[in-house]
Image (tube, rainbow, N blue to C red):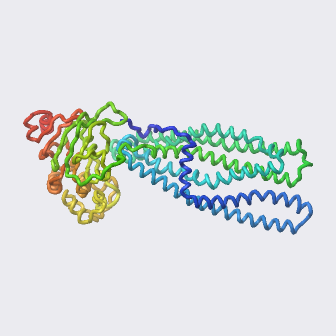
């Protein structure tokens, strides 16, 4: 199975930027009322800004020319009132859009998280956790300015540019054409910069993801690092990743910062051409001073939003790669999902059948992990799976839980193909305890109750007693209310495993799967746990994977798995008498 390591750049599907933008902006359409209100407010503020130069022209050409002080005072009062309305409208629209943007980000993050939860183990097996976190947190946060500015900046600035261009063309088309001659030069420069900058920002996002993944991996493995005194080596790797991250950022910013100079140069040329053509070609005497002042204001009003648009375009180029990474995850199809007409699995009796089952990872279809495996288990039977590492034992129990999809054949529970029932109704009837005794941050009680969220306190205590975890829990300062971290640092490995075992027990499964469940428990505790298993799981079908063969001698049948198939099957006594593969394993372990 192909794996993306923390220091490897992720592969990503290529999607047209236009498609990504439309998909991103569609999230805003859920807030039509708020957007309509913002657009109405913007229409008012834009109208005010458009009238201001005309008021200036009126003041100079009429009231100043005629020496009318009362007219100037009235015009000034009107201008002050309009300015206050402009400020109030601008503040209101920014407040509304900030609220809408934050709600959109919450929606995107929730959808991304919910989709990630539907993905199969194969998705998580192939990439570091830190790279998934980078998309859920960092990449989503990067969209804030793009979403907000798309309405509060993009729309009014575009409207302002169009209105100013129309007004200038109506008032004096020759001056207008002179002022706008450099626009094609601006468009060409921005296109060239954007094309290069987008590619560099994609690289930067990948380097950010690599760095996040390595930090998460490094902190998770800090005990191993310190145990082997590998701090210097990990530090060198970290410095190398931060250097790559810094260089990628500098390269992207160096190109993206070209937007500003291009706008400033074309603005300056536009202003020069306005005055040169207005004075030398058209003739200053043919244009009133007020008109020249109005045009000077309008050209500033034209190029200022152009500069804002260039900055927005720069943000868009910077952050569109984040949206691409988010949608790349959202578009990842779940390998394991409910069939179109999936049935709710009724309460199981515990019959399990493998019918000619083969399995290979989807990215390595020719390398079979299981080859034509067939067996049938009666309700209430205990099946032990033994064999060398990598033989396929864990794969078998994972297929029962449908954590992976079979490549051939079928897995049947009570005669029902697991692919034809809903995942929730299937897994809710299975009790699974793996080698990874992961505990969540919270109390002891919360961790045990995670196996069945509606369990009562009495049932929590009963499950703990059944696996002999009750006594050590009560010896803790706060008993069942003792807070622990996800690492369970206050507990021994065996104690953490007992808590995980109680969590499995409380789910009262029809089928129990124990994958090396007692590997970290001392011999004395293991004897007590075995008694708890016999009492609590009597009459339930169970699959036990164990390398310590002493723990599975009471199993009804033992399957010896090797090279992707069942090499031997029978009780402990039968297999010992046969003196085959199991006999050799048993003898080698105890001798």
Residue 391 seen in render: yes
Q: Quadrant of residue 576?
A: top left
**Residue at position x 68%, y 52% from top?**
157
What is the quadrant of the N terminus in the image? top left
Instruction: Please state, as top left, top right, bottom left or bottom right, where the C terminus lies in the image.
Output: top left
Q: Is residue 73 left or right of residue 127?
A: right
Q: Residue furthest top?
A: 366
Residue at (24, 58) in percent of width and height: 506
Give the image location of residue 428, x and y in percent. Answer: 28, 54
Pick whichever, 323 or 228, lies toward us. 323
The image quarter in which residue 329 lies: top left
Name the side, left or right, on which 188 lies relative to 443. right
Q: Residue at x 65, y 39 (%)?
A: 191
Asked whether residue 222 appears in the rendered view, the answer is: no
Q: Position of residue 453 (x, y in %)?
A: 31, 60
Q: Horizontally, is 111 left or right of 91 in the view?
A: left
Q: Tell which residue pokes out farthest to the front in this image.
A: 341
What is the x, y in percent for residue 71?
86, 67
Q: Is residue 457 above or below residue 232?
A: below
Q: Nearer the viewer, residue 34 or 49?
A: 34
Q: How many marks?
A: 0
Q: Position of residue 342 (x, y in %)?
A: 33, 49
Image-based side of 100 in relation to 411, left or right: right
């Amino acid at each position: 199975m192909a794996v993306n390591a923390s220091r490897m750049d992720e592969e990503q599907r290529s999607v047209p930027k236009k498609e990504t933008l439309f998909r991103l902006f569609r999230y805003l359409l859920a807030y039509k009322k708020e957007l309509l209100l913002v657009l109405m407010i913007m229409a008012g503020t834009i109208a005010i800004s458009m009238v201001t130069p005309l008021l200036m022209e009126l003041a100079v050409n009429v009231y100043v020319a005629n020496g009318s002080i009362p007219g100037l005072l009235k015009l000034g009062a009107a201008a002050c009132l309009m300015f206050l309305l402009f400020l109030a409208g601008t503040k209101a629209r920014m407040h509304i859009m900030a609220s809408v943007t934050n709600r959109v980000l919450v929606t995107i993050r929730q959808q991304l998280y919910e989709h990630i939860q539907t993905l199969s183990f194969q998705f998580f097996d192939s990439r570091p956790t830190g790279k998934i976190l980078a998309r859920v947190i960092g990449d989503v946060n990067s969209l804030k300015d793009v979403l907000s500015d798309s309405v509060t900046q993009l729309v009014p600035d575009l409207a302002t540019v169009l209105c100013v261009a129309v007004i200038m063309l109506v008032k004096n088309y020759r001056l207008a054409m002179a002022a706008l001659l450099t626009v094609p030069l601006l468009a060409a420069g921005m296109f060239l910069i954007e094309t290069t900058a987008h590619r560099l920002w994609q690289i930067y996002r990948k380097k950010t993801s690599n760095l996040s993944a390595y930090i998460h991996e490094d902190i998770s493995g800090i005990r191993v690092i310190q145990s082997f005194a590998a701090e210097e080596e990990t530090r060198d790797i970290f410095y190398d990743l931060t250097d790559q991250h810094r260089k990628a950022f500098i390269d992207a910013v160096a190109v993206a910062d070209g937007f500003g100079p291009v706008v400033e140069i074309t603005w300056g040329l536009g202003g020069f051409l306005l005055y040169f053509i207005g004075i030398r070609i058209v003739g200053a005497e043919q244009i009133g001073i007020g008109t020249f002042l109005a045009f000077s204001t309008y050209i500033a009003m034209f190029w200022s939003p152009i500069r804002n648009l260039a900055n927005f375009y720069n943000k868009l180029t910077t952050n569109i790669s984040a949206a691409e990474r988010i949608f790349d995850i959202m578009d990842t199809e779940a390998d394991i999902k409910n069939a179109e007409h999936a049935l709710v699995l009724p309460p199981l009796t515990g019959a399990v059948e493998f019918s000619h089952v083969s399995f290979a990872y989807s990215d390595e279809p020719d390398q079979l992990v299981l080859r034509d495996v067939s067996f049938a288990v009666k309700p209430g039977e205990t099946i032990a799976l033994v064999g060398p590492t990598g033989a396929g034992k864990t794969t078998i129990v994972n297929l029962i839980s449908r954590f992976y999809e079979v490549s051939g054949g079928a897995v049947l529970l009570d005669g029902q193909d697991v692919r034809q029932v809903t995942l929730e109704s299937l897994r809710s009837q299975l009790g699974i305890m793996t080698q990874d005794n992961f505990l969540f941050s919270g109390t002891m009680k919360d961790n045990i109750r995670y196996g069945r969220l509606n369990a009562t306190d009495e049932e929590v205590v009963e499950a703990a007693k059944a696996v002999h975890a009750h006594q050590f829990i009560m010896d803790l300062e706060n008993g069942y209310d003792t807070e622990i971290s996800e690492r369970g640092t206050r507990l021994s490995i065996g104690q953490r495993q007992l808590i995980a075992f109680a969590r499995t027990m409380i789910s009262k499964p029809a089928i129990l799967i124990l994958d090396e469940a007692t590997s970290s428990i001392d011999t004395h505790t293991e004897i007590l746990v075995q008694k708890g298993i016999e009492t609590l799981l009597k009459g339930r079908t169970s699959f036990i994977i164990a390398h310590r063969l002493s723990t599975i001698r009471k199993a009804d049948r033992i399957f010896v798995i090797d090279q992707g198939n069942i090499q031997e099957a029978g009780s402990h006594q039968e297999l010992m008498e046969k003196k085959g593969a199991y006999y050799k394993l048993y003898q080698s372990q105890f001798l």
